[in-house]
Amino acid sequence: MFIKLKGKDLMIAQVYVDDIVFGSTAESLKNEFIKFMEVEFVMSMISQLNNYFLGLQDKQLADSFFLSQTKYAQNMVEKFGLRDSKGVRTPLGQQDKLSKDDDGKTVDQKLYKSIIGSLLYLTVSRPDISFSVGVCARFQSTPKESHLKAAKRILKYVKGIEELGLWYSNRSDLDLIGFTDSDWAGCYDDRKSTTIGCFYIGDNIVSWSSKKQNSIALSTAEAEYIAAGSCCAQLLWIRQMLHDYGIGHDSFTLFCDNTSAINISKNPVQHGRTKHIDIRYHFIRDLVENEVCDLKHIGTNDQKADILTKALHADRFEKLQRDLGICSRSP
């Protein structure tokens, strides 16, 4: 990451392998960076970078910022021929239990991968579809009719609400907060759990994830404990990035709805309940002991990460959607 400060203005360019994202609080600094890149690199590369940078629609208002991919979502629904289809209220039905479905009819792999790839790009501004897209993405090697039906349901959900995006308020504080959750043995094929996390700076969500764990958890507490450890690692990374931006944080708060996982993090004794857990997850104990991480209990009804955990009833889903800051216009 490269940072340039000029008075009160900030210019940031972040590079990862062959990808780059840049932005600035001042239009002049951004244009200066583009001109510099045009001198150092061929024009086609600058065109790609600028297109990526402008790929997200942004509306700058007096005290807020709205981020959406409306045009992209509309084109995607049109591309896959679902413009005239009937919309649905949730991206994944509660009755949909996706598995490998070995006896199901195989569908066009190229079409299925194209749908999943398009949806994955949309998750940049739509955390409400992250869980369902992640589940469907597991079956790209041998997609069946049941998988294609589920993927098309996500497109039907997107249809009609393409304008949804993330609302960011400039008036929010800068406290670093995370919500961690897990669905124990949620994968029907290998019984592995999923680590879920959503991370906030003040009231604004800045990162989220829904990822299947590498090993099988033997209990709900273990799955939640592993998820909490992974979320702590993400919060540490965000804290370091904020430090690079000149925003210091000594500690952060992580909310978990499992009291057993919280108790394990505060217990320095390796007893029978935790001795089989990979040692790499126990670093959370040091963070709690050193007061870097304040691990707090939160009720299930207030758990914002629940939307990334499983298929939900429409009313519950829409409430959590609003809690994440997903909307179509100013709240």
Image (cartoon, grey):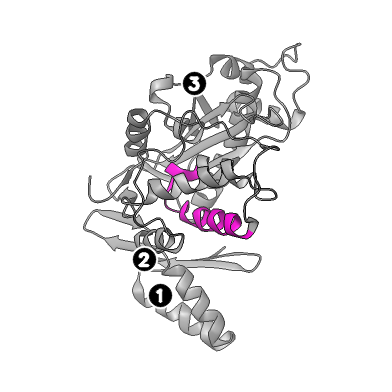
In the image, what residue occupies the spot 66% across and 37% down?
Answer: 101
Q: Left or right of 276: which side holds 255?
A: left
Marks 3/1: CA–CA distance: 44 Å
Mark 3 sits on what residue? Answer: 257
Residue 25 numbered mark, or none: 2
Q: Nearer the viewer, residue 152 or 316?
A: 152
Q: Left or right of 267: which side holds 309?
A: left
In the image, what residue occupies the spot 69% across and 48% down?
Answer: 142
In the image, what residue occupies the spot 59% across and 67% down?
Answer: 19
Q: Which residues are magenta?
A: 110-130
Give, as a three-letter code, the residue at label 1: Leu
Q: Nearer the viewer, residue 233 or 91?
A: 91
Residue 29 numbered mark, or none: 1
| N-term-proximal mark, 3 vs 1 | 1
Marks 2/1: CA–CA distance: 8 Å
| Placement of the C terminus among the 4 image quadrants | top left
Count of numbered marks: 3
Badge 2 vs badge 1, beta-carbon distance below 8 Å: yes
Helix, strand or loop under label 2: loop
Q: Left or right of 140: which side holds 174?
A: left
| Placement of the N terminus among the 4 image quadrants | bottom right
